[in-house]
Image: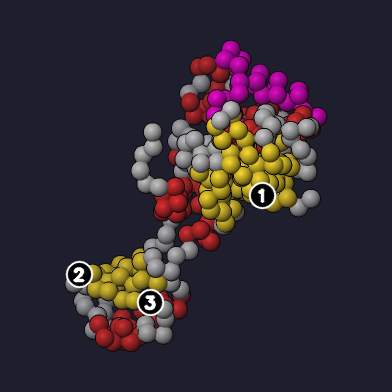
Amino acid sequence: MDKALVVDSVVKRFGTTTAVDGMTFSAERGEILALLGPNGAGKSTTLDMCEGFQRPTSGSIRVLGIDPATRPQQVRDRIGIMLQGGGSYSGVSVREMLRLAASYNVNPHDPDWLIELLGLEGVASTRYRRLSGGQQQRLSLALALIGRPELVFLDEPTAGLDTQSRNAVWDIVNALRSDGVTVILTTHLMDEAETLADKVVIVDRGRVIRQGTPAELTEHDDFPAITVDTASRFEPEALARALSLFDVTVEETRPDHYRITGSATPEVIAALAAEAARQDVSIRELSVAHRTLEDVFLDTTGRHLRS
């Protein structure tokens, strides 16, 4: 199979409450998929079903071609799961926990290599309960990777991490993809999803609302694309003529400040620079804005707090 994960029309009910309402999405092998949604959107329930901890009420799931509802252990033998709760015993040290986890796998990674990779050398003999939140998070990632998984579920992998640790985790996630490992990522950090993900699935109230690549989701022709600050003013009619071949509009927002709405293609920027040279207008600052994944997320799921 080319697809590592297939979630097809999945429904999950708890009594009269529908937590997942017809969820459908898939992930290719060697792909990073970011599953995004507000708290209570159905992400955790969906992942629990993918990992074989719950059964769907209806619909089907295939993980590496296997049904996790009927063969959960076969699925878990081939995947890695990073839990926010840590997944370790409070009185066990980092090295002991990784060696214990390694003993459950046929061909595990070297625990000491993972300790070094995740910067845990200084706390390798420290008991779990005495680790900082960030150290516990990095140990949780190490436990997810110890068995050389073909697919790994990462739940908020950089929550509570400092900048250095966060960048290190990003490097590891990209390395997993390069090695052909599929990564299913949940995060509330939109820049993380936009940076890492090949595909983004936005869910709310148990349903898939939007999905696509980050570029597809953030594409928006009406978004203000280029802002320009100049040392002197453009001759407005000449600037409009210079850009008339392109599907853009030009507005002087205040003296010597311009906003060009439309597609920020290289041709538009080249034409703008050429016209500035012709008019002898010095550009002090030029920035190309784009619609962010956060804009898409808020437009899709709403901007108000929920109870």
Question: Which picture quadrant has residue 72?
Answer: top right
Which tag, 1 or 2, sits closer to the chain's start?
Answer: 1
Instruction: Please tell me how many numbered marks the rendered image carries.
Output: 3
Question: Which portion, as a residue range, is magenta?
Answer: 80-109
Question: Which picture quadrant has residue 91?
Answer: top right
The location of residue 101, given as percent across then percent down, is 70, 24
Instruction: Decide: few, some or many residues near mark 1? Use Cα within 10 Å; few <14, some 14-19, many ≥20.
Output: some
Instruction: From the image, tell me which residue sits under label 3.
Output: 248
Instruction: From the image, tell me which residue sits under label 1.
Output: 26
Amino acid tagged 2: Arg
From mark 1 to mark 3, how far is it between C-alphas? 36 Å
Q: Is residue 230 left or right of residue 177?
A: left
Q: Is residue 178 left or right of residue 288?
A: right
Instruction: From the image, tell me which residue sits under label 2.
Output: 254
Instruction: Decide: few, some or many residues near mark 3? Use Cα within 10 Å; few <14, some 14-19, many ≥20.
Output: many
Q: Is residue 235 visible?
A: yes
Name the residue rendered at 52%, 16% in the picture. 129
Name the residue rendered at 46%, 32% in the picture. 160
Q: Is residue 106 above or below residue 238?
A: above
The location of residue 176, given as percent across then percent down, is 66, 45
Verify CB contact (< 8 Å) between mark 1 and mark 2: no
As rendered, which of 287 and 298 lies closer to the eye? 298
User: Which mark's residue is nearer the viewer, 2 or 3?
Assistant: 3
